[in-house]
Amino acid sequence: MIGRCAFLGAVLLFAVFCGVVYSASCVAGFSDNLNIKVLDATFRPIEGAAVNVTYQKDRSTGKGYVTTKTQYTDKDGNVKVGILNAEQTQAWVQCDVTINAYYDAKTVTRKVTAQSHENEIQLQFKDAYLLSVHAIDRFGNPIANTQMRIKNQYVNTSEDGYASVVVNSGAAGMAIPYLNGVITGNVTVNADTSYTLQAKIYSIKVNVVDDAGNPLVADIIIENQTYNQSSVEIPEIALISPSVKAVYGPAEKILSVNLADQQEYTVSFDVTPPQIRDVSMEKTKDGGLKLRFFVLDPNPMASGADIEATTVTTNIKGITDTLVPYAESGRYVVEIPVQAPNTLIRFTINAYDEQGNSNSLNGEYLVPGEEQPVNATGNATTGENEGVNPQPQGVDYGVLPWVGGIVVIIILAYVVFTYLRGITESK
């Protein structure tokens, strides 16, 4: 009897359990309205949190799970999401519903069962806290009714200069416009935090000069404000490191500014072309040639010669070639292969400085002919097989020419003597 009663009790408990499970499960084709509330670490509502819901649409048609369109919580942290299941086969129904909330680069997820959940479904960001910022000028007066950025959110300050926003723990940067600049600050949040953002006023002066140090009119851009002049001075700016840029023609220079350390800055632009000096050509041991030259950028604020941009263009017998120089003992050098004697080499040096200014120099060089060796007789000789005929050599007749000369003189003397004697006797 006792065993029978125990058996009946077990059956009854099983039936009750099954009834509870069945009552907690959703049915095919269910619909549900989800009242979702997003809260911070101290259960305060979070406004502007992004929320969506993923649930089963159906299995019969292959749609499977779908995700609702993203909605945003109101000032009370609430959002309502309706879901509708289209499944017709009860055995295929899936009742799990996933709720995702996104806020300040973090995500909180919660899963519930369709048609079996509390009336208000709460999602809590357990590391989210209230950051209250008081924006004031250098005199302590509120910076009122001005849009302030706190992390990635924008809020307006009140008449008293206050702005509050919920942020997740960690570093929180902020910025608010003031005068000609922007006041910035940063604070680490790991609990409810109050922070005073006070303007500090600095002065700044920017000068633009050329490479010789003379004033140069350029575009001076300070915090997106452009001044076309050689010098700009702003007596009050609420930025310790404002963005400063100078533009002259195609050249642009960005300054690294810290007004707490320095208030006046000078930027220079090289406007003078480099100089090409001391050009020379020398013959190497292997018979080749080396063209040497200096590229100078002499002004005190010049950018300096740019060896990588400098080139030499040669024209030899109608063939043009571009050579890249290398540095050797402070000079630029290009090497030219061996050339035949009397070859005319035309060249152009194209020099650049680091600012992009350029200068050119044209020149030419005639490869000298080879020197002719001289033989013992004083006659110039040539190499073999050059087709040059040698000069003829003289014949040596010894003393005969001298004897003949004396005989002729004696005969002439005898004739003259006889002639004169004959004249004398006739008288």
Image (tube, rainbow, N blue to C red):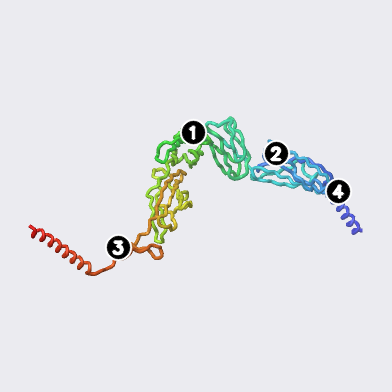
- Which mark is nearer the camera, 1 or 3? 3
Q: CA distance from mark 1 to mark 3?
A: 82 Å
Q: Earlier in the sequence, mark 3 or mark 2?
A: 2
Residue type, mark 3 in image:
Gly
- Which mark is nearer the camera, 4 or 1? 1
Q: Is residue 150 above or below residue 276?
A: above
Q: Are marks 4 and 2 in contact (CB under 8 Å)?
A: no
Asked if residue 20 shows in the view, the reply is no
Give the x, y percent position of residue 261.
45, 41
Q: Sort mark 4 into few (<14), some (14-19) or many (20+) by Cα contacts within 10 Å.
A: few
Report the front residue among 58 and 93.
Answer: 58
Name the residue carrying label 2.
Answer: 72
Q: Is residue 210 above or below residue 411?
A: above
Quadrant in the rendering for residue 6: bottom right
Name the residue carrying label 4.
Answer: 89
Q: Are marks 4 and 1 in contact (CB under 8 Å)?
A: no
Name the residue carrying label 3.
Answer: 378
